[in-house]
Image: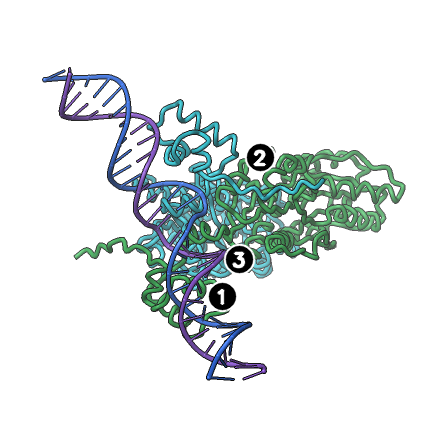
Chain colours: A cyan, B green, C blue, D purple
Amino acid sequence: MPRVSEAAKAPNMTQVAERAGVSAQTVSRVLRGHANVQPATRKKVEAAVQALGYRVNGAARALASGRTQTLGLIEIPSVNYSSAAIGHGVEIAAREAGYSVTISATTSSHPQDVAAAFARLEEQGVDGVILAIPTRSSTSDLGAFAERIPTVSLDGSLERGVQVVAVDQHKIGRLATEHLLDLGHPSVWHVSGQRGWVDADAREAGWLEVLAEHGIEAPPVLRGDWSPRSGERAGELLARMPEVSAVFVASDEMAFGVMSALTARGRRIPEDVSVVGVDDIALAAYATPPLTTVAQSYEALGARAVRHLLARLDGVEDESVGESIVPELLVRASTHPWS
Amino acid sequence: MPRVSEAAKAPNMTQVAERAGVSAQTVSRVLRGHANVQPATRKKVEAAVQALGYRVNGAARALASGRTQTLGLIEIPSVNYSSAAIGHGVEIAAREAGYSVTISATTSSHPQDVAAAFARLEEQGVDGVILAIPTRSSTSDLGAFAERIPTVSLDGSLERGVQVVAVDQHKIGRLATEHLLDLGHPSVWHVSGQRGWVDADAREAGWLEVLAEHGIEAPPVLRGDWSPRSGERAGELLARMPEVSAVFVASDEMAFGVMSALTARGRRIPEDVSVVGVDDIALAAYATPPLTTVAQSYEALGARAVRHLLARLDGVEDESVGESIVPELLVRASTHPWS
DNA sequence: ACACAAGATGTTAGCGATAACAAGCAGTGG
DNA sequence: CCACTGCTTGTTATCGCTAACATCTTGTGT
């Protein structure tokens, strides 16, 4: 006999209240962990909740309270290590604080597209937004949204109403370049990240700064776009220049491309050319040879963004504002003293 | 003079209706793209919406309509290539269909944790759930949820009420193994994925099947856990066995570890040992040597899961149920004829 | 010219919670 | 012994939208 369940509608708070012999308001208080409820009452309510398998209706709660306990994350879908890691940091931190995370993907960083992503989140009623779009241009027209919804940006740029959390990208460039110069290399070449990305620009600036401090004239920048393929193209050029002995690549993924191209053209790593990457992706230690890189915790970055945002939502000042996540150099076999 | 904006409350539908000189219901109709609205009326409403900067209140809409236009994605946060790619496929497909995606992360695949993730989504009122937990055990106790909320699972296992979308993992194992045997290798070793994962088991089964078809006795499985480090450990063992000439590794990330260990111990790839991975991660083509691998589109998998789910929500039968995503062998330099 | 169908718009009544206020009940100090 | 304070609990009025039904047009066939 087919037991077609009568699509039993989910119970509501009133039904729980009836069963527990109290008012709906009391049920609401128990569910929200309100302090002033008699232990006995609390127990009765909890029993009724359990018995009916009751679950609060988020939409109703949101409508009545004005809060959704949801954070929005705007990002560009890519299988980049960094964006995935940031996302996870955000999710975990949000969950621990009792918030959900809704992803609002945007295919480009054009202000228009980002604004559309923002609008979707606003409709959904998110309590706050984390903007993980790493190009500066994209945030300039978003002030209107940020004024209505608390927003934290990860792009390193500072706009009106938008708080910022960032890794110290500049230091990354410095660490990598100093490491190579310390090894005795006469100069350091640079394969940059995509033009317009805050991270790319800051890393490049750090590199330039260190070279300048050492009185070294900077070689031309080889501009990549974060993809391994772009690293490979840069590597093909570098392989043709015998004077190149040290390369700072703005991401590990591009560094794989660079190393692949150099190796394929007979330039040995690290004997002929030293290579430094950035990110410490999981595979960096398993490259051939293992890749020296500058590590930074993107998870921590995401988590910090959440903390900032929640602090603002609670009207508290987050004292860790401005503190950057500190990057760290990991020396592996892809770098070698100059000979 | 500090222009402290009076926290101007967002306009509601009634205000839009007044401004447009129509009823709220008509505004609602226009906003939802209802057919029977006079063009002139529609225009008036749209103008009022524009003028007031009106945005529907999702919570109210959800409460009244019972639908949130939101999908839940349950996953284990990891910087795995596959999970990130699936997530993006889901997000993009969902967005195109006008749905948002809420991530519900679970730190383990224990049924209890997965159930908690499910419960959070249920409270939030998602219209459907995509379960991207790749271990079979995890779905067994989830039937109760799946009966209440339409659910699609990506784990390849079939449970009551749960529809499944999957890559043909079995074929992946076959393709890789056949390729190596075709190159003349007398046998093929296997570094598997984590025990209990549907993908790992199916790939291993495909490998075993092909060996059996060729009358080859299967060597012992080296069990990994998807991490490059576990691949490295397997590689250390393989390097000590001179008879090993061909290895099928269940993921590219582990394959990097395997290759790193083999190379470090003087086993040349592909001259001494051929290696095949799975996934075609972005870096596979830039490994040293470039990695032969079996590619599959995880984005397509995610997108298909969304299509299934939406078809079910609309009460339509999705005719593509059961069709698997077809994997494809990409031959690169890490495999070589046996000599 | 009239009944009637079909389209366009308006009206009413919730959806399921929470906020704000009201009320009841104990214990306290004068 | 009474007014008063502080804790518990209940009552009422929304929150902003949509479903369902009601009403008013307009055009059609005969």
Label 3, secondary structure: give it: helix
Give the label on residue A180, or none.
none
The residue tagged 3 is B95
Q: Residues within 10 Å of mark 2 (few under 14, many from 20)?
A: some
- Labels 2 and 1 within one chain: yes
Number of labels in the image equals 3
Residue at 39% in and 34% down: A32
The residue tagged 2 is B108
The residue tagged 1 is B34
Q: Is residue A39 visible?
A: yes
Quarter of the rendering containing residue B46: bottom left
Residue B164 in the image: x percent, y percent? 67, 47
- Mark 3 in CB contact with mark 2 (< 8 angstroms): no
Q: Residues within 10 Å of mark 1 (few under 14, many from 20)?
A: few
Label 1, secondary structure: give it: loop
Mark 2 vs 1, N-terminal side: 1
Mark 3 vs 1, N-terminal side: 1
- For the residue marked with disc 3, what is the amino acid? Arg
| Mark in front: 3 vs 1 | 1
Residue at 57% in and 50% down: B87
- For the residue marked with disc 1, what is the amino acid? His
